Image (spheres, rainbow, N blue to C red):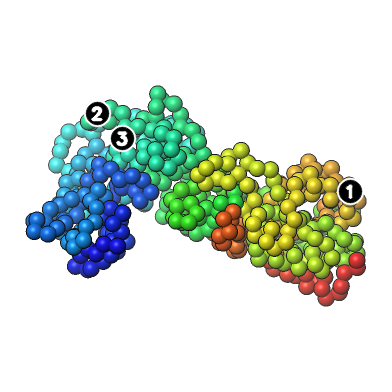
Amino acid sequence: MTCILLDGREVEADPKKPLIHACHQNDANVPMYCYHPGLTPVGSCRICQVEVKQGEMPPRVVVACRTPVAEGMIVNTDAHRAHEARRQCLEFLLKNHPLDCPICDKAGECDLQDFAFQEGQGEGRSVEPRRKLEKRKSLGDVIVLDQERCILCSRCVRFFEDVTRKPQLTVAGLGAHSTIETFQERPLEGNYQGNLADVCPVGALTLKKFRFQARVWNLTKTPSSCGECSRGCAISLEVLRGGEVKRVRPRYDPEVNQWWMCDHGRFAFGAFNAPDRLQGGLLRGSAGWEACDGERALDEAADLLRVHAAPVVMVSPWLTIEEGALVQGLARELGVRAGFLSPPESPLKDDLLHTGDPCPNRRGLSELGFEAQSAEQALERLAGAESALLVGERAAEHVGDAGLAALPAGLRLVVFETRPVDVPAARILIGVPNAAERLGTWINVDGRRRRIAPSKAAPSGVTALTRSLAGLLERLSSVGVER
């Protein structure tokens, strides 16, 4: 490490990182546009200027993102000359930026707004009209570009060059005619386009699916983990006024996904907002389904499992460690071995983040002793059983609705799911929370524990799956099970 004097404090800095990294690591507020810690620094926006003195040389203003740290360097981030240089850069950037903050999706989390306020740059001196460029330009099925808002920081260009290693954007034209363009006007491709909206410091690149959906100050942001593959990327679930999940974004995690996530995980949140939720319990009677509370449904499930020997116990790969441990307790009480549903590998597998494994907790469930079962194997076991227990979010989806519908009507199936499973074999349905409504732990492909956390309330009548499983186990243990 290298020792420098930063705003009057002696701090240690990583010599392999630029000066701006040392500033941010030590709570020195230095603005930035073109710099991103996950991308190659270029020093094009000039907003990160600070005053630096080295040896006998007089203090000079430099860009912190392109300046290496040196032993004994004296850095003043709050110097008058540094603030003046930043204000001049901001005036230049705001010269052509449109005044459309009221309708911009980036309003409320825009760096241009924040730094203009922070540096006191509230007015411009030029009277020339702003340049006219293309607005609402589609760059494919994920991103919309507003060229007038773009400040040419080139983060989007470098994202494809540095992260995905498949360049798709470039800065075309010269001087005031420079714009961000795709090569030969081709639409963007790949599973990581959504990251462009994250790296863009202004409102030039926005998500088509989030445009005009919510104001960011009305979103409640909850740290959680993505369950769309076994990587377990750190994410932020963003909920509008306690209702629907409106946006999913990556959270920085140096050991798992750094600053990024794939589009498959980013846009899969529609399942968390599904309207046809299973609330409380449903019992099949002579006249069809009868609604009941969760306690009665558990009583009926315990009676059914107590009477019919050796039930098949099959769980969803979305089950948490805590839920899986309770299911294993049930399996031991019933004298059977539980399995978890193992879907086929996804074609989205890549060398960056997506593992291709749709099971977010495969490793955790395997360590608990669950046996991996394909949909075909699970259906074969279910078809030969007298009774069965199907547990967890997306369990029915992974078995397949058509396969479940073809099971013998004589099978007595108890289902813990997020949605109704109306098949002839189903006898008891009990609603459970989804991954945006519950707390728990997954273990990812590399053996790291990944926490999921509730970002919104479960529907009325839906109880935590751990509580339902514990209640069922208590009922079976108190009376005993016929085997």
Mark 3 highlights which residue? 148
Q: Is residue 176 above or below residue 123?
A: above
Labels 3 and 2: the sequence-earlier one:
3
Report if residue 472 is visible in the image.
no
Mark 2 highlights which residue? 174
Q: Are marks 3 and 2 in contact (CB under 8 Å)?
A: no
Q: Please identify the quarter of the rendering in which residue 346 is found.
A: top right
Question: Residue reaching furthest top?
Answer: 184
Q: Are marks 1 and 2 in contact (CB under 8 Å)?
A: no
Instruction: Tell me which amino acid carries mark 3.
Output: Glu
- In percent of width and height, residue 306 lies at 87, 66
- In percent of width and height, residue 243 lies at 55, 55
- Residue at x-position 31% and y-position 50%: 111
Mark 1 highlights which residue? 409
Q: Tell me the CA gap for discs 1 and 2.
A: 71 Å
Labels 3 and 1: the sequence-earlier one:
3
SS at circle 1:
loop
Image-based side of 21 in relation to 343, left or right: left
Q: How would you rate the neighbour count of disc 1 (Cα within 10 Å): few for under 14, some for 14-19, many for 20 or more?
A: some
